[in-house]
């Protein structure tokens, strides 16, 4: 059984491997990613080697430039709902880039589709309002 220090080091190394893999898939160098994240290339290299534990603000910045944080942190473990296939990841990435009106239209379409499949009677607008409220989305009328 590994002690906590060894387990942490293993997790950091796995994080670094997955981080480098995602960066390369985005066709970015360490320096380019570091510039995007407003950090030094040396710090970025430390993350990828598993020498430096990522801070929360670093993870937020990675997410903002399209990195899949659950995969970085949990891939290879029991991911459950966090695992997205490539098509789902594309939908998420496009949704994140859309304006509020498009997001509401997408939510309306999904809610309508789900309600129709389940045979539920009810107001689709109410379903969308519930979903939108959970997502903190508001629109100007």
Image (tube, helix red, strand yellow):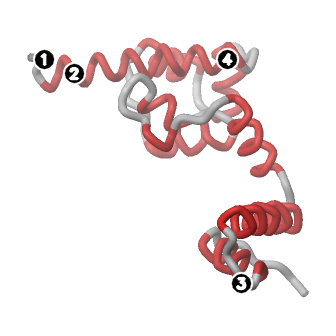
Residue position marked by numbered label 4 in the rendering: 31
The Cα–Cα distance between marks 4 and 1, rounded to whole angstroms, is 34 Å
Q: Which is nearer the N-term, disc 2 or disc 4?
A: 2
- Residue at 69% x, 36% y is 89
The Cα–Cα distance between marks 3 and 2, rounded to whole angstroms, is 51 Å
Q: Which is nearer the N-term, disc 3 or disc 2?
A: 2
Which disc number belongs to residue 7? 2
Measured as percent of width and height from the top left, residue 60 is found at 56, 45
Q: Nearer the viewer, mark 3 or mark 1?
A: 3
SS at mark 2 in the image: helix
Residue position marked by numbered label 1 in the rendering: 2
Labels 2 & 1 near each other (Cβ < 8 A) = yes
Q: From the viewer's perspective, is 36 left or right of 39?
A: right
Q: Which is nearer the N-term, disc 3 or disc 1?
A: 1
Q: From the viewer's perspective, is 15 left or right of 113?
A: left
* 50 w.r.t. 124: above or below: above
Corner quadrant of residue 133 = bottom right
Measured as percent of width and height from the top left, residue 7 is found at 21, 21
Corner quadrant of residue 90 = top right
Labels 3 & 2 near each other (Cβ < 8 A) = no
């Amino acid at each position: 059984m590994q002690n906590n220090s060894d387990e942490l080091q293993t997790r950091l190394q796995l994080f670094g491997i997955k981080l480098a893999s995602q960066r390369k898939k985005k066709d970015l160098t360490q320096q380019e990613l570091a510039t995007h994240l407003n950090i030094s290339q040396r710090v970025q290299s430390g993350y990828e080697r598993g020498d430096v534990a990522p801070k929360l603000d670093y993870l937020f910045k990675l997410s903002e430039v399209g990195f899949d944080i659950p995969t970085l942190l949990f891939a290879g473990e029991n991911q459950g709902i966090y695992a997205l296939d490539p098509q789902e990841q594309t939908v998420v990435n496009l949704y994140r880039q859309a304006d509020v009106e498009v997001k509401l239209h997408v939510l309306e379409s999904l809610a309508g589709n789900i309600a129709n499949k389940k045979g539920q009677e009810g107001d689709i607008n109410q379903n969308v309002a519930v979903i939108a409220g959970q997502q903190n989305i508001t629109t100007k009328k």
